[in-house]
Amino acid sequence: MQLTLTSENRLDLNHTLTSGQTFRWERIGEWWYGVVGRNVLKLKQNNSKLVFESYPEEVDKELIRSYFRLDDNLSSITRKIRKDKVISEAISSFEGLRIIRQNLWECLVSYLCATNSNIKVITQMISNLCRKFGKRIVFEGREFYLFPESKALARATLSDLTDCRLGYRAPHLRHTAQQIENGSVNLHEIMRLEYEQARRNLLGRSPGGKTLLGIGPKAADCILLFSMEKLESFPIDVWIKRLILEKYRHLFEDKFLHRLASTKSLGGGVYVATADRMRSYFGRYAGYAQEYLYSYARTRLAKVTYSM
């Protein structure tokens, strides 16, 4: 099947799938392979045509439109976040990059695993989890695995989870899965909240005491952005921090910049204050700005160092 892209819903598949949002896509030749829901998807892009196949079930165009957020008017969004020369260059360099609309549970687990790690290690941890706890599917002679359900991880032993190379994340993941299974945490309820309250819930700061162990501020912002429709969320990792120190110093006071530069692991007040300022600057689509700036920073700032 194929889907025709327009100027409003344009998509660059390569930019989108290499932007660090999700960890289960692999490019083989001209095709991208990934698992979405209960199906393996195979996609490639020919200019304005998005060609796709699925197995074992045939998926329709609406699933593709939803997953790649083709309902977002990208032209309008990029006009609104084009606040300066840096973001303008990032948008031009990565035109067609879109935020992916991910499954709530899969996104939560992915970014719990992402704590204090890098893309290569995160990808391996998630692959290990899927192989050990997910259903196996063979497509075109290759093995793929569905993402494990929360009940499988809630029942897992710490030994089994540790075998997946999760390290200290193993008890956090099992506890989170158990909370979801016993109903003490409802991700869909959190999703319906406004950004600030949803973030407090993910960080375990809700009045009701609902706690998701292992979720830090950056992971919470990623979950909010990629699976909870909070497009104003602005996750900050080491690349965005470096970009801010290089290109967006004018948005902060000198005293705060010293704190930001000297903090090795962003957390607490420094993280929140930085994210809040960037979200205020870029507005309701700050999450899109973050994705463009993240890709820009990874390619342009690799050799930049800072001194304060």
Image (cartoon, rainbow, N blue to C red):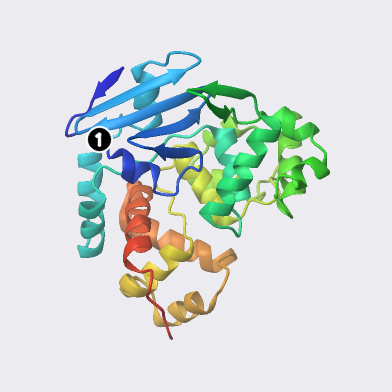
Look at mark 1 in the image and give the residue it sits on.
73
Regarding mark 1 in the picture, which secondary structure is present there? Answer: loop
Density class for disc 1 (Cα within 10 Å; few <14, some 14-19, many ≥20) is: few
Q: Is residue 230 left or right of residue 174?
A: left
Residue 82: where, in percent of width, then height?
A: 22, 54
Q: Where is 204 relative to 248, above or below?
A: above
**Residue furthest to the left:** 7
- Identified at 65% across, 34% down, the residue is 131
Q: Kindly tell me whether residue 183 is visible in this rendering.
A: no
Q: Nearer the viewer, residue 44 or 308?
A: 44
Residue 22: where, in percent of width, then height?
A: 48, 42
Q: Quadrant of residue 216?
A: bottom right
Q: Quadrant of residue 211?
A: top right
Q: Nearer the viewer, residue 6 or 254?
A: 6
Q: Nearer the viewer, residue 91 or 300?
A: 300
Q: Nearer the viewer, residue 243 or 20?
A: 20
**What's the amino acid at mark 1?**
Asn
Q: Where is 235 relative to 257, above or below?
A: above
